[in-house]
């Protein structure tokens, strides 16, 4: 575990939402709970991140990740959160 609080922001704009953000939100919430990271990671939504054609989008600790797919999300989270 790390002493540093990490941040995940998901784009909640209509374009990203129509591309599957609801499933991604649920996946991230479950991942944080299963890995017991709820106190170490701030997970929030942002109205629009401005790259609608490349959604769904995440910002993990300041790094933008485009075209997020649920099938690759666990790998992305493990890599970016250092797990």
Image (cartoon, rainbow, N blue to C red):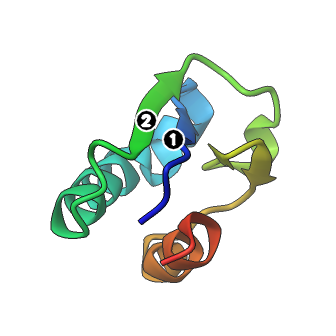
Reading the chain from its start, which is encountered first: label 1 or label 2? 1
- What number of labels is visible? 2
Q: Residue at x 34, y 47 (%)?
A: 25
Q: Residue at x 60, y 49 (%)?
A: 56
> Furthest residue to the top?
47
| 22 shown above or below 81 | above
Instruction: From the top left corner, tell me how far across and down residue 38 is, in percent.
Output: 27, 46
Q: State which quadrant residue 7 falls in.
A: top right
Residue 76 left/right relative to 64: left
Which label belongs to residue 5? 1
**What SS does tag 1 mark?**
loop
- 78, 50: nearer the viewer: 78
Q: Which residue lies most toward the front here?
A: 3
| Secondary structure type for disc 2 | strand
The quadrant of the picture occupied by the N terminus is bottom left
- Asked whether disc 1 touches disc 2, contact meaning CB atoms under 8 Å apart, the reply is yes
* Few, some or many residues within 10 Å of mark 1 (<14, 14–19, 20+): few
Residue at horizontal 43 percent and vertical 35 percent from the top: 42
Q: Pick the residue in front: 11 or 76.
A: 76
Residue at x 55%, y 46% (from the top left corner)? 4
Compared across the picture, whether 10 is left or right of 1 comes to right
Q: Percent x, y for residue 68?
A: 60, 63
Expressed as whole percent of the image width and height from the top left, the position of residue 18 reads 48, 41
Q: Is residue 52 above or below residue 14?
A: below
The residue labelled by disc 2 is 42
> Residue 10: horizontal and vertical position, in percent?
54, 38
Tell whether 52 sits left or right of 26: right
Task: Give me the C-alpha separation between circle 1 and circle 2.
Answer: 7 Å
């Amino acid at each position: 575990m790390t002493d540093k609080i990490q941040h995940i922001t998901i784009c909640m704009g209509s374009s990203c939402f129509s591309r599957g953000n609801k499933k991604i939100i649920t996946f991230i919430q479950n991942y944080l709970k299963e890995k017991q990271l709820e106190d170490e990671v701030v997970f929030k939504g942002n109205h629009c991140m401005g790259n609608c054609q490349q959604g769904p989008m995440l910002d993990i600790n300041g790094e933008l990740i485009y075209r997020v797919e649920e099938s690759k999300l666990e790998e992305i989270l493990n890599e970016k959160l250092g797990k």
